[in-house]
Image (tube, helix red, strand yellow):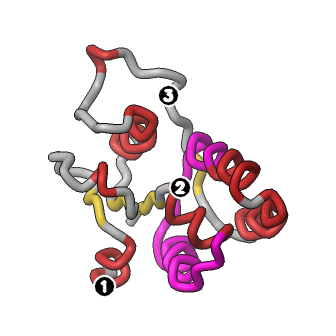
């Protein structure tokens, strides 16, 4: 099973030291195939630089020691190519990448994703993922 974890999970796990979310990420990496795209990684670095620059090194070490498959995100998506609607357009590229890369489960705590009607990937909160898998 291929699992993509959203940036907000990584932020809480690495920058705000949520042990629960670190375990979730490690579970996705060790029991399944964790998949990340450059957009998520870049967004994590940007958030780190703004919110907790002193913890950026810890976050880099965590990512370096993590087993994951990196897939490419499209550089841009034209309006007539959009697969779904989402309130925050900045979040669009992440889920679009998950769809075109055939991800099975997308884990996020961002409520903007919860009302999107797609068959795959399955969109789960961190608690839903941990309970189900």
Q: Quadrant of residue 94?
A: top left
Q: Are marks 3 and 1 in contact (CB under 8 Å)?
A: no
Q: Earlier in the sequence, mark 2 or mark 3?
A: 2
Task: Identify whether 85 is placed above or below 3.
Answer: above
Q: Quadrant of residue 61?
A: bottom right
Nearest the viewer among 9 and 77 is 9
- Magenta residue span: 16-43
**Residue at mark 2:** 7
Q: Quadrant of the C terminus?
A: bottom left
At x 49%, y 72%, the residue is: 28
**Could you tell whether 103 is left or right of 7 in the image?**
left
Q: CA distance from mark 1 to mark 2?
A: 20 Å
Task: Identify whether 27 is placed above or below 120.
Answer: below
User: How many C-alpha atoms fall within 10 Å of the one at disc 1: few (<14), some, or many (≥20)?
Assistant: few
Q: Earlier in the sequence, mark 1 or mark 2?
A: 2
Q: CA distance from mark 2 to mark 3?
A: 17 Å
- Residue 31 in the image: x percent, y percent? 49, 79
Task: Give the label on residue 131, or none.
Answer: 1
Task: Give the label on residue 74, or none.
Answer: 3
Q: CA distance from mark 3 to mark 1?
A: 32 Å
At x 34%, y 75%, the residue is: 129
Q: Quadrant of the N terminus?
A: bottom left
Q: Is residue 30 visible?
A: no
């Amino acid at each position: 099973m291929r699992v993509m974890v959203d940036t907000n999970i990584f932020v809480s796990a690495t920058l705000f030291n949520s042990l629960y979310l670190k375990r979730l990420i490690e579970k996705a990496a060790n029991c399944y195939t964790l998949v990340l795209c450059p957009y998520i990684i870049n967004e994590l670095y940007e958030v780190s630089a703004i919110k907790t620059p002193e913890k950026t090194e810890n976050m880099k070490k965590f990512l370096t020691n993590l087993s994951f498959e990196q897939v490419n995100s499209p550089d841009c998506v034209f309006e007539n190519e959009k697969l779904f609607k989402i309130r925050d357009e900045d979040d669009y590229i992440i889920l679009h990448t998950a769809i075109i890369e055939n991800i099975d489960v997308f884990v996020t705590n961002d409520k903007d994703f919860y009302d999107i009607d797609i068959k795959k990937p399955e969109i789960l909160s961190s608690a839903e993922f941990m309970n189900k898998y």
